[in-house]
Image (cartoon, helix red, strand yellow):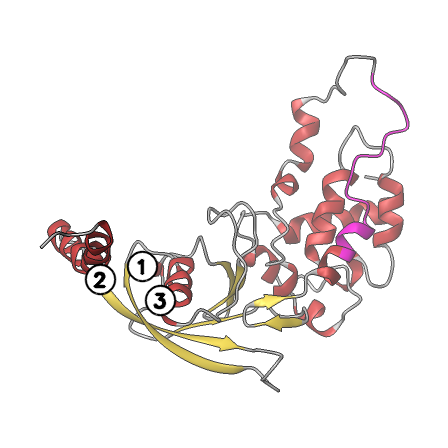
């Protein structure tokens, strides 16, 4: 009896899980059954969000994003979340993991207590669209309002770049690291209760240009942030600094903008 290519492919696919398990056993790497409790919401059928639990076989070196992929690909394809680069650069997979804002792609299973369920939900303070996805438009509206781009009154010499010293660059180097994940802004208690507050991320990105020696519109941004919903709404709780996956000293940056507002210049 002849064997078709299709038969070989089907047998190969069917044997794949067994081969993967055998390979894991050969390396001596131990897997664990981890319980995830995810806050689900489908606006087409749910009136309120609901918690759903999933048991996932993982390794200590896996990330929360790997677990979400496994749930979506192998258990429930309707699970909805954002992700792109999976390497902590794009910032699209910010979510609350065990009550803290983190990037799913940077949160390792080994850094969590897997003897207890791992709770995952959408970030707070922004309109919930579906499952772990929120509407980011209010966040980006505040970002755009602080004019986060270089504004210079003079042009550089033809064919030349704008020169800046190492010392001048160091002044705002920290705030250039923002990836607009909204982890800081959505960890802020003021932002949760006041939908008009600019939020930490917008202030951080204003800081990046206010203190840039090549920029000539620092006073404009300071006027914008001197508004009642600007820097003075910050209560210095340090939630934003703790939540930042890039290690930006967000609270320090906000304090520096406050001082610049009081001085009337950067």
Element marked by disc 1 = helix
The residue lying furthest to the left in this view is 1
Q: Is residue 127 magenta?
A: no
Q: Pointer 3: what residue?
A: 74
Q: Quadrant of the C terminus?
A: top right
Q: Is residue 75 left or right of residue 175?
A: left
The alpha-carbon separation of the residues under discs 3 and 1 comes to 22 Å
Q: Which residues are magenta?
A: 141-156
What x and y, as percent, mark residue 104? 46, 58
What x and y, as percent, mark residue 105? 45, 54
Q: Nearer the viewer, residue 15 or 250?
A: 15
Q: Are marks 1 and 2 in contact (CB under 8 Å)?
A: no
Residue 56 visible: yes
7 above or below 48? above
**Label 1 Cα crowd, 10 Å radius (few <14 / some 14-19 / many 20+):** few
212 above or below 10? above
Q: Residue at x 46, y 46 (%)?
A: 87
Q: Pointer 1: what residue?
A: 110
Residue 184 position by quadrant: bottom right
What x and y, as percent, mark residue 51? 47, 81
Q: Is residue 154 magenta?
A: yes
Q: Are marks 2 and 3 in contact (CB under 8 Å)?
A: no
Q: Nearer the viewer, residue 83 or 222?
A: 83
**Nearest to N terminus: mark 1 or mark 2:** 2
Q: Residue at x 84, y 40 (%)?
A: 218
Q: Nearer the viewer, residue 242 or 259?
A: 242
Label ID, residue 47:
none
What x and y, as percent, mark residue 99? 50, 71
Q: Pointer 2: what residue?
A: 31
């Amino acid at each position: 009896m002849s064997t078709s290519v299709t038969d070989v492919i089907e047998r190969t696919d069917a044997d794949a899980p067994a081969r993967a398990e055998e390979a894991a056993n050969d390396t001596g790497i131990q897997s664990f059954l981890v319980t995830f409790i995810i806050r689900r919401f489908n606006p087409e059928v749910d009136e309120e969000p609901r918690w759903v639990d999933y048991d996932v076989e993982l390794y200590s070196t896996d990330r929360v994003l790997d677990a979400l992929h496994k749930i979506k690909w192998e258990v429930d394809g309707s699970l909805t979340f954002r992700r792109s680069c999976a390497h902590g650069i794009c910032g699209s997979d910010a979510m609350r993991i065990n009550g803290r804002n983190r990037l799913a792609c940077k949160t390792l299973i080994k850094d969590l207590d897997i003897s207890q369920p791992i709770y995952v939900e959408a970030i707070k303070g922004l309109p919930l669209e579906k499952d772990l996805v929120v509407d980011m438009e209010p966040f980006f509206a505040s970002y755009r309002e602080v004019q986060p781009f270089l504004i210079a009154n003079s042009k550089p010499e033809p064919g030349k770049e704008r020169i800046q010293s190492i010392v001048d660059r160091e002044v705002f180097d920290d705030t250039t690291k923002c990836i607009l994940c909204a982890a800081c802004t959505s960890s802020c208690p003021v932002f949760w209760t006041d939908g008009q507050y600019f939020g930490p991320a917008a202030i951080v990105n204003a800081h990046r240009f206010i203190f840039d020696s090549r920029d000539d519109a620092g006073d404009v941004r300071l006027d914008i942030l001197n508004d009642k919903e600007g820097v003075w709404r910050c209560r210095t709780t340090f939630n934003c600094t703790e939540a930042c996956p890039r290690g930006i000293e967000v609270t320090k940056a906000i304090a520096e903008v406050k001082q610049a507002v009081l001085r009337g210049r950067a």
